[in-house]
Amino acid sequence: MEVRKALTCVFFSVFLWSGDAQDSVPDSVLNCCEGDVLFLLDSSGSVASYEFFRMVNFLSELLLPFSLGLEQVRVGLLQVGTEPHLEFGFDTYNSQQGLQAALKRTRQLKGDTNTVDALLMAWDQVLKQGVPGGARPDLPRVLVWLTDGVDPGAVQEPMARLREEGVAVLVVSTGHGNYQVLRDVVSPPAEEHLFFVDIDDISIITEDLRNAIIEIIRAERLQVKSVTTTTALLEWRPVLAGTGYYDIQFGPVRTGGNGGPGGSGTSPGTGLEPFKRITRPGDASSAHLIGLRPDTTYTVTLTPKANLDFLNSLSATFTTQPVSPPQPEVQTLSTVTVSESTTNSVRVSWGPLQPNLIQGYQIEYSALHTGQLRVINVSNRQNSTVLTNLYPDTQYLVTVSAKHFSGKERAMSVKACTQEVLPALSDLQLTAVGNESVQLRWKGSADGLRGYWVTWERGRSQRSTLYLPPNLLSTTLTHVPPSARVCVSPVYRTARGEGLCCTA
């Protein structure tokens, strides 16, 4: 009874504290993090349809603020039932629009609560690093288990294995399950990673759970990009949520003297310039360093400055490019071709492959004049892809863009045409109406039809042909010798359809 009272007080306190904050998500959440988060959702028959609906809506609200993508947050959803079902993996959605639509399409599995098999699939296929479709190396991994508290089976051992592999485990329970079991499986501290809440009040933990995930996958690293002979671009994950400012100090690496970040002057005898200092506002996530010397190693330190919070400084070292004669431009995208055209798909290929220069490829395509633009992204080691769900007999404009690590892009476009649908002829009937005369009747489709092509044998090595308009479905042939072969084929704009033949 005392435990239940304590939990009630905790739930009530959380409700009072976060009720007004659910609708306001800090801007820093949008670009704060980098990692792979897998949600293990109890979809068995012990979960009422209403509860399942509320859980999915809870996930939608929880994930809405995150930026998704290859260098951001990736999300997977694994459902628990009699057999585990991977609803979508980490490499499926890189936009909120696609993720939110997928959550709306999610349907409950029902069946048994076989959590152990689902955890084995998560460990072996989804959260394992380096396997196709698995988690990314050297980035945080999180498993969030949503359960109704009904006995999940012997989950302690597979959960322990995941934690030993470096996976952070969080649990949300909407029922009255075994508290000790759930406390044993979460990553410490349990008070920050274990949530008990009634399904009707699940939205009150949205912000707390989101913050717990952010603390695990927050990317606190300073990246130096686009380094030239005299400039460099700094990028970082914003942590100030628009308040305060970023203090940036940079200068050549010193081997002696009192120079360095926070110091002043040059090192004796080095002849190098003093450290420089610039600032950026709290909502910034990048800065350009200019006036650098060619072929020089620099160190840079970024310190977030806030009124109340003490935040860690981030440092990086880089070397500017040496001055060299201009080099001819590398042709990272010189050919784009189309092949394997069907009525609803085409294959687009490009080259040459240069993964050391290219970060990835983006393919944009739309039907000419009236089509909606569609976009897909592929890795830097892929040189072709199949565009599907296209309209028949339609011309498309396809643009392939190569995204360089340097930030540049090179694009090429090509037109692609899908094949025309060619309905086959059906029910050819041949009736004798006199000496060496036969009547033909058939059934055909009027869509796109240009006419009919009739051929028949008039003797050895002799053939006759007849072209008929599309509105005719019968004709009479004369001078047809016995056992002659008679064929009728539909004619369309681009080709003949499949015809039928009979023997007189």
Image (spheres, helix red, strand yellow):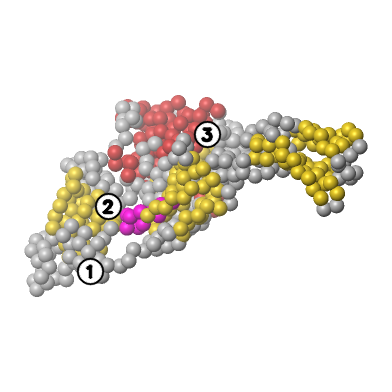
Residue at 8 percent across and 71 percent down: it is 268
Residue 332, above or below 347: below
Task: Please give the residue where the numbered disc 1 appears in the rendered image.
Answer: 323
Query: Where on the picture, by quarter, is residue 327?
Result: bottom left
The region drawn magenta spans 400-409
Where's residue 432, x and y in %? Answer: 89, 35
Q: Residues within 10 Å of mark 2 (few under 14, many from 20)?
A: some
Q: Residues within 10 Å of mark 3 (few under 14, many from 20)?
A: few
- Disc 1 marks a residue whose amino acid type is Val
The span from disc 2 to disc 1 (Cα, nearest Å) is 24 Å
- The first of marks 3 and 2 along the sequence is 3
Task: Please give the residue where the numbered disc 3 appears in the rendered image.
Answer: 105
Q: Residues within 10 Å of mark 1 (few under 14, many from 20)?
A: few
| The furthest residue to the bottom | 269
- Which of 388 and 165 lies nearest the eye of the viewer? 388
Q: Main secondary structure of the magenta part?
A: strand
Residue at 25 percent across and 70 percent down: it is 324
- Disc 3 marks a residue whose amino acid type is Arg
Task: Please give the residue where the numbered disc 2 appears in the rendered image.
Answer: 235
- The first of marks 2 and 1 along the sequence is 2
Residue 1, above or below 407: above
- Which of 98 and 83 lies nearest the eye of the viewer? 98
Judging from the image, what secondary structure is the residue with disc 1 in? loop
- Which of 135 and 231 lies nearest the eye of the viewer? 231
Judging from the image, what secondary structure is the residue with disc 3 in? helix
Quadrant of the snapshot with the C terminus? top right
Where's residue 437, x and y in %? Answer: 87, 37
Whether 119 is among the magenta residues is no
Is residue 372 left or right of 494 when viewed as pictured? left
